[in-house]
Image: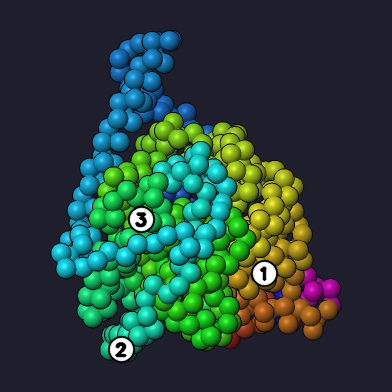
């Protein structure tokens, strides 16, 4: 049975008188990765690998037009005005009044939720100083400070912090060698007894970790240290916002383990809290690399055993890759009783609404965040994402432009702008924008993936493959990037076979099969991956395996006509050959 080249438009394969089709959609869907909005301590990243319980809408971007049309549905605020049966200026005034009432209602909910969370946290971590204890004090010489821009958090002098020194780490150890080693030992003992370290708690940026609440001795030690060392440290680091250390609240405290052979790094993200805290539990000599990479500074902040770093949670940061050894840290997220982060909570509410399928309500609440703080680039970014979701590309482009006008180095804004340009058919602009996003953060796998998408749509297969190679270097388990690279390798391998470069074509087919097999393992419920694997196996002459893949795809998605057709046609062909 001669093999014929697959055409990427539909990837149709010649099969005697029958046709096998591949569902080789050039890009992924734009679905948001979401987790429960109840848990506040999750880590986050915009447009790529973030999630719904954070302040930033997040989606793995695509460059395939989803067939959306700009909707004509009336907005919530305008609907409220319509109910009053008024028109013209009166209608606009009514809409403004409705918006004001909605904002007032949301702010009230924010306060209620904040109070509840702070009270709940107090049950686990008491901030009050015991009568027989002494509170440690910290002066300027106790910190090494890192300054960021005055509007990094979207407000003049960074909102409540009223400062630019938003990253501060201790010059001396906060905890002793013995204290740190005791935490590591208990964490390892717990992991051995419970079947290993956990990796599932944080959805979009999973850490290899164990909750401190599962380590009784370490928990008791940390609870004693909070009012005497930890909270005073944070209060003295940020005196403009923390007036009373006993009003600090901490949650989601956990021990993280990095290993060069397993989880060697953590991608760039933001933490969903006001202030974050990291304590190094083992010495730097135990590993190579490591530390906290700070995106706006393009700098790694390194800690030695017992040292702590505290910083504004909204700063984009990540766990710098270690190349050998093991690194242990203790992480916690903090709120302050007297500081309700209204704009962050509005954005969280907006995301929760979107995840629940209430897109219009989500957009209205996001507009409230913009109204409350028009200098917050993340709010404009999220508004652009919601507009893009409903196909309002022109409006979305303007919103992303607003975000970038506020902060030109806002990498997520460039990522999302490029995605929107691609969806709007502005592919050359999308490539140029994707290059800017990569330049701002060469370590962002999503940025490289998006660049590959735009390049592939322009027919630049070699460049697209190069970008996908880089994306997979940064995140080897990115199933969608593996799927896309497998598709491109299948396309180029088929062309090589057709041009009689059989050796090159066979090697390319083998590589495509390997990519798609890995993608299938990482996305076991994806019919599209199984179907494309079937096409690659078919092109390589492995017909029985191809049939298994097509049938598996059809079993995963009964509505996948391509998989069903491929399975039927190949089954008939094999029956005729055998018969």
Looking at the rendered image, the disc whose residue lies closer to the viewer, 2 or 3, is 3
Say which quadrant the C terminus sits in.
bottom right
**Range covered by the magenta-colored residues:** 495-500
Cα distance between the residues tagged 1 and 3: 42 Å
- Coordinates of residue 122 in the picture (x, y in percent): 20, 58
Marks 1 and 3: CB-CB under 8 Å? no
How is the model colour-coded?
rainbow
Cα distance between the residues tagged 2 and 3: 33 Å
Residue 497: in magenta span: yes
Query: Which residue lies under the disc numbered 1?
Result: 470
Judged from the image, the secondary structure of the residue bearing numbered disc 2 is: helix
Residue drawn at x 30%, y 88% as measured from the top left: 189
Farthest left residue in view: 131
Which is nearer the eye, 467 or 23? 467
- Coordinates of residue 149 in the picture (x, y in percent): 57, 47
Residue drawn at x 77%, y 66% as measured from the top left: 462
Q: Residues within 10 Å of mark 1 (few under 14, many from 20)?
A: some
Decide: is 563 above or below 189: above
- As drawn, the label of residue 189 is 2
Residue 188: in magenta span: no
Residue drawn at x 41%, y 16% as measured from the top left: 92
Q: Residues within 10 Å of mark 3 (few under 14, many from 20)?
A: many
On screen, residue 379 versus residue 191, left or right, reads: right
Query: Which residue lies under the disc numbered 3?
Result: 235
Decide: is 52 above or below 129: above
> Which of disc 3 and disc 1 is earlier in sequence?
3
């Amino acid at each position: 049975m001669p093999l014929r080249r697959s055409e990427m438009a539909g990837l149709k394969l010649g099969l005697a008188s029958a046709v096998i089709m591949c569902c080789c959609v050039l890009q992924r869907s734009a679905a948001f990765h979401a987790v429960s909005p109840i848990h506040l301590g999750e880590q986050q990243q915009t447009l790529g690998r973030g999630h719904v319980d954070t302040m930033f809408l997040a989606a793995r971007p695509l460059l395939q037009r989803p067939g959306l049309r700009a909707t004509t549905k009336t907005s919530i605020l305008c609907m409220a005005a319509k109910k009053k049966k008024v028109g013209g200026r009166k209608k606009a005034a009514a809409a403004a009044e409705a918006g004001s009432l909605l904002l007032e209602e949301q702010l009230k909910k924010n306060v209620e939720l904040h109070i509840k969370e702070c009270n709940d946290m107090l049950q686990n971590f008491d901030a009050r100083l015991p009568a027989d204890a002494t509170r440690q004090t910290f002066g300027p010489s106790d910190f090494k400070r890192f300054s960021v821009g005055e509007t990094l958090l979207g407000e003049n002098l960074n909102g409540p912090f009223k400062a630019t020194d938003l990253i501060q780490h201790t010059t001396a150890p906060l905890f002793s060698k013995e204290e740190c080693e005791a935490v590591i030992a208990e964490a390892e003992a717990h992991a051995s007894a419970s079947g290993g370290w956990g990796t599932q708690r944080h959805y979009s940026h999973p850490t290899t970790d164990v909750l401190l609440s599962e380590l009784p001795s370490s928990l008791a030690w940390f609870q004693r240290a909070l009012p005497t060392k930890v909270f005073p440290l944070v209060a003295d680091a940020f005196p403009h916002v923390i007036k009373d250390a006993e009003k600090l609240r901490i949650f989601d405290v956990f021990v993280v383990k990095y290993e060069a052979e397993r989880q060697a790094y953590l991608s760039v993200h933001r933490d969903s809290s006001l202030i974050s805290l990291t304590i190094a539990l083992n010495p730097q000599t135990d590993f190579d690399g490591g530390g906290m990479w700070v995106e706006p500074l393009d700098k790694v902040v390194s800690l030695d055993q017992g040292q702590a770093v505290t910083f504004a949670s909204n700063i984009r940061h990540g766990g710098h890759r270690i190349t050998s050894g093991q690194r242990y840290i203790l992480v916690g997220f903090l709120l302050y009783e007297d500081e309700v982060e209204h704009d962050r909570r509005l954005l969280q509410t907006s995301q929760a609404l979107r995840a629940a399928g209430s897109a219009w309500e989500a957009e209205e609440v996001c507009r409230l965040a913009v109204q409350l703080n028009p200098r917050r680039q993340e709010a404009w970014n999220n508004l652009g994402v919601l507009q893009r979701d409903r196909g309002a590309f022109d409006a979305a482009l303007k919103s992303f432009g607003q975000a970038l006008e506020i902060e030109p180095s806002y990498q997520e804004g460039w990522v999302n702008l490029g995605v929107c340009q691609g969806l709007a058919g502005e592919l050359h602009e999308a490539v140029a924008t994707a290059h800017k996003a990569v330049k701002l953060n060469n370590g962002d796998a999503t940025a490289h993936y998006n660049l590959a998408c735009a390049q592939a749509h322009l027919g630049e297969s070699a460049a697209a493959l190069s970008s996908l190679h880089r994306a997979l270097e940064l995140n080897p388990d990115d199933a969608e990037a593996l799927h896309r690279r497998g598709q491109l390798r299948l396309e180029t391998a088929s062309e090589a076979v057709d041009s009689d470069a059989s050796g090159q074509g066979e090697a390319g087919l083998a590589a495509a099969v390997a990519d798609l097999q890995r993608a299938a393992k990482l996305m076991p419920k994806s019919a599209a991956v199984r179907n494309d694997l079937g096409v690659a196996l078919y092109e390589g002459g492995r017909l029985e395996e191809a049939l298994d893949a097509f049938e598996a795809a059809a079993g995963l998605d009964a509505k996948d006509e391509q998989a069903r057709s491929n399975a039927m046609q190949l089954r008939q062909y094999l029956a005729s050959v055998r018969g």
